Image (spheres, rainbow, N blue to C red):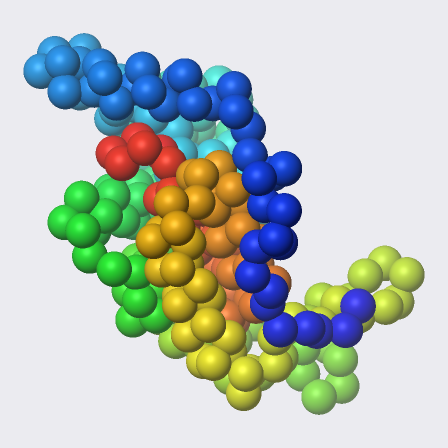
Amino acid sequence: MSWAPIEDLPADRERLELPELRPLDALWREKRAELEQLDGMRILRERLVRSWAIETGVIERVYELDRGTTELLIERGIDAALIDRSSTDKEPALVARIIEDQREAIEGLFDFIKRDRELSTSYVKELHAVLTRSQEEVEALDQFGNAVMVPLLRGEWKRLPNNPRRPDGTVHEYCPPEQVGSEMDRLIALHREHQQQSIEPEVEAAWLHHRVAQIHPFQDGNGRVARALGSSCGPVGSP
């Protein structure tokens, strides 16, 4: 599949909306202030954030973690001592650090939104740096097509192509490195226009997630960044 520049939402974007979400959103906004006064709400929010942080790494194949350990960490907190070595494919201490990075990233993102700060390319880079803080290397191909491990560029646009080869031998092309800056600038500009147009959150979340993944601006960690940015389009303060 050849690379193509990102596109705006379609003219008939209304067909992408999910009207059944409106009553739930209205109820959340109505009850939120009241619920936030309760300690139970604080505990629930902490667990939701931990759930997002843990499952992000599983979904994006950063690590494997069995369901029982996932539920234990959500319930009791992020602690390497709670992660049995047999429950994951990496060292428990590393898994715990990665989860903590992801928790910090989503908390920081929601704090960013609460302060009414506009999304920018510099913040996207900051987000990537936090999400990948405990990741030192990434797999790449050398000039002979051999897989090698190279240092990860945290918080920097990619410098080389990162196009994956499918099982059938075809190559999926992401945005070329030399076009990443302009494509990300366009993505941010379109996102701001969508905010001014009050695009429904589920539509904007899907659009933003897909377009970041389409550009694939970083050497690695693109799925984590896309998921975080998509999550930011929902009700503020909840993943």
* Total marks in image: 0
Residue 112 vs 235, above or below: the answer is below
Left or right: 176, with 122 as reference point? right
Left or right: 35, with 231 as reference point? left
- Figure quadrant of residue 92: top left
**Residue at image coords 56%, 61%:** 8
The percent coordinates of residue 195 (x first, y second) are: 36, 51
Residue 159 vs 220, above or below: the answer is below
Residue 60 vs 31, above or below: the answer is below
Whether residue 116 is visible here, answered yes or no, is yes
Q: Nearer the viewer, residue 211 or 102?
A: 211
Left or right: 139, with 151 as reference point? right
Q: Nearer the viewer, residue 82 or 141?
A: 141
Left or right: 171, with 178 as reference point? right
Residue 40 vs 8, above or below: the answer is above
Instruction: Give the farthest residue toward the right.
Output: 168
Instruction: Give the farthest residue toward the left.
Output: 37
Whether residue 73 is visible here, answered yes or no, is no
**Residue at image coords 88%, 67%:** 169
Q: Quadrant of the N terminus?
A: bottom right
**Residue at image coords 34%, 53%:** 196
Q: Nearer the viewer, residue 82 or 105?
A: 105
**Residue at image coords 75%, 67%:** 172
The percent coordinates of residue 18 (x first, y second) are: 55, 28
The percent coordinates of residue 128 (x first, y second) are: 37, 62
Q: Quadrant of the C terminus?
A: top left
The percent coordinates of residue 218 (x first, y second) are: 49, 70
Q: Nearer the viewer, residue 145 or 50?
A: 50
